[in-house]
Structures are given as C-alpha cells and as structure tokens.
Image (cartoon, rainbow, N blue to C red):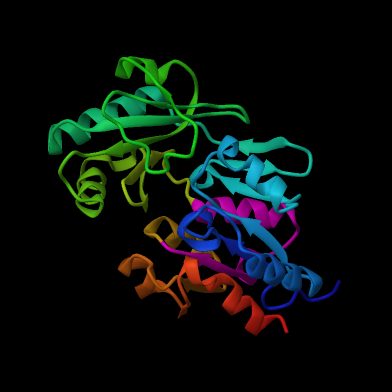
Amino acid sequence: MPIPPAHALVATDLDGTLLRPDDTVSPRSRAALARAAAAGARHIVVTGRPVPGIRSLLAGLDYRGPAVCGQGTQLYDAGSGRMISAAALDRELADTALGKIEAQVGPVFAAVDQDGTDGRTLIEPGYLMPHPALPAVRIGRREELWAAPIIKVLVRHPELTDDALAEAARAVVGDLATVTLSGPGTVELQPYGVDKGTGLALAAEALGLDPATAIAFGDMPNDLPMFRRSGYGVAMADAHPELKAAADEVTLSNGEDGVAAVLERLFR
C-alpha cells in the first residue's frame, strides 16, 4: 500500500477562508485546488454552514466528495447528494442550555439549523443573520424553534461581544452542548463532543486517509479542533487571535487568496 503524501488532505473552512468576501471562490483558488488534486491530494470542505447552505456552492466547485457541515454535525456526500451521518442536538438540552445562558447574561436572540439535507434555518424575533444571503425562516415564538430535529443553535446577545458571550456560555452550559465561536455574531451550540475536528476525522476515514495528513485552513476558533486533528494548520491573515496563536503558519487574507498562496507553494 503506498504511503500517503504529507498533505494527502486539504481541509478548508469556507467563510472567511476559502470564500472571498463576496461569497465566491476565486479562479486562482480553484486553480490551486485543482493543482493539489492533480498531485493526489483530496479536498475536504469543513464548514459551520449546514448542508442546504452549501449545496449550490459545492456544485459550482464540481465538488463530489465528503463535506463536513454544520460544525461537524453533518457528513454529506456531495457526489450522491446523501447524508452519510448526522448528529442531532437534543432539543430539551438545547432549551435548557439557552435558559442557563440567559440566566447568566440576560436575554439573547436565538436561531436553529434543522437536521437533514433540506433542513431550514429558523430565526426568532430580533435575531439578525450573520450571512444575510443565506435563507432563513422567521418564526414568532421561541417554542417554534424546537418543532423539528436540529443540529445546532445560534445565539446572539444585544450588547456582549462574541468572545464574551462564548466565554459566558461555556461557563454555564457544561456538558449540555459544545459552545463554538465560528464568526462575527455567531456563537453556536452543537451536540457535546462534536466539532470540526471530529467531522474531519469522519471525512478522512470515509476516504481511507489519516486526518494527520491534512493541511487545514481556517479563520475562527471553531477551526481549532480541526487544526488539532490535522498535521499542519494555516490561519488567515485576519483570523481570530486565538486561532493565529495555534497555527503553524499565517497566510494572506481570504480576499487575497491566502489558501491559494499556500497551495501554490506546496503543490508545484
């Protein structure tokens, strides 16, 4: 059996990383990914977005392999359009976790990503989507968030910074859920013990590869578990300081095609 190359996997976050600020993948990044593929490396998308939020993007990339979605809660096969595996967040635990957070910091605004390849994003009154282009359904009361199985809860506070809200949530949620800071205005709760690292490990296993052969690209603290499972972590120039501190390398920003800059160097 041949020994896999040092970077047999290229694991990329989407928002703030592979995607440019206009939500597109540049021709340069496409060419760099194609160069890596020609050298035998497999690209794995590892994103906080649920499956419905990335299907059209994956199709535009002609991406046909396993994709880690929903902060590691979903492993989706883009080629067949089927869900390989999914981890739902218990709705009673989610409601309890929200109550604990509000007891600590006061009222918050919440949204949920539903389970399934056609799951919807539901947002309660007052919640502002961090990505306005992504589809969402506004509901009237919080109880409606729990109408169907979910993979994660998104939480926003009217005054606290994202870092302060995430810290406060971790202090009170305990093992009810994993608390993740994944982007501006995006503190999330997902099943306890599930994250981008566990998702990357599942995707690598599906491909018959070791996640330690991955070079991983990211920009926010939710990418830390992915970095820990990978052999090499690359943070974007404007990444969160916590991720930069854990990275093996800092590249250019997503607007400057930072992923492509590294891949062009590695895959000549």
Horizontal relation, residue 167 to residue 231: left or right: left
Viewer-proximal residue, 85 or 81? 81
Horizontal relation, residue 248 to residue 110: left or right: right
Work out whether 16 lies above or below 193: below
Q: Quadrant of the C terminus?
A: bottom right
Work out whether 89 lies above or below 162: above
**Quadrant of the image occupied by residue 110:** top left
Viewer-proximal residue, 6 or 112? 112
Query: What residue is at 61 percent from the left and 63 percent from the top?
Result: 26
Query: What residue is at 37 percent from the left and 18 percent from the top?
Result: 139
Work out whether 99 lies above or below 80: above
- x and y percentages locating residue 112 in the rendered image: 41, 30
Horizontal relation, residue 135 to residue 57: left or right: left
Residues in magenta, as a range: 196-219
Query: What residue is at 69 percent from the left and 67 percent from the top?
Result: 33
Viewer-proximal residue, 164 or 193? 164
Query: What residue is at 75 percent from the left and 59 percent from the top?
Result: 208
- x and y percentages locating residue 254 in the rendered image: 49, 66
- x and y percentages locating residue 226 in the rendered image: 51, 61
Q: Is residue 205 magenta?
A: yes
**Quadrant of the image occupied by residue 155:** top left
Horizontal relation, residue 155 to residue 39: left or right: left
